[in-house]
Amino acid sequence: MPPPSRLEWAYTNIAQVREQLLAAAAFGKCLTPEQLENAASKLSEGLRIYTEETRKLE
């Protein structure tokens, strides 16, 4: 199986953060500052790569 493309990797990171935040909200779970910082980093990196890759398509 080939490794995921950059766009697939970015989408996966964004989806993981979304799922983490939805689960926390649904079950009233508090996330630690470290968990929030990690989520923000994953989201930031995913959005950066997504933006780069979609601009190539224009």
Image (spheres, rainbow, N blue to C red):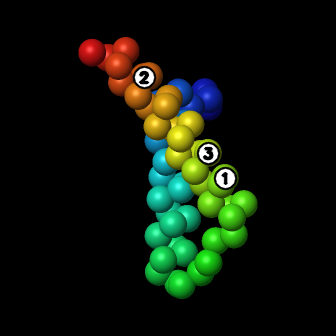
Q: Distance between the residues labelled 3 and 2?
A: 18 Å
In the rendered image, residue 28, in percent from the top left (x then y), is placed at 54, 84
- Nearer to us: label 2 or label 1: 1
Residues under numbered marks 2 and 1 in contact, where contact means CB atoms less than 8 Å apart: no
Q: Which residue was labeled with disc 1?
A: 38
Q: Residue at x 60, y 27 (%)?
A: 2
State the mark number for residue 41: 3
> Alpha-carbon neighbours of circle 1 within 10 Å: few (<14), some, or many (≥20)?
few
Q: Which residue is drawn at 56% across and 31% down?
A: 4
Q: Which residue was labeled with disc 2?
A: 53
**Residue 56 appears in which quarter of the rendering?**
top left
Residue 12 visible to an observer of this rendering: no
User: Quick one: label 3 or label 2, which is nearer the N terminus?
Assistant: 3
Residues under numbered marks 3 and 1 in contact, where contact means CB atoms less than 8 Å apart: yes
Q: Is 23 situated left or right of 39 in this image?
A: left
> Alpha-carbon neighbours of circle 3 within 10 Å: few (<14), some, or many (≥20)?
some
Q: Nearer the viewer, residue 50 or 34?
A: 34
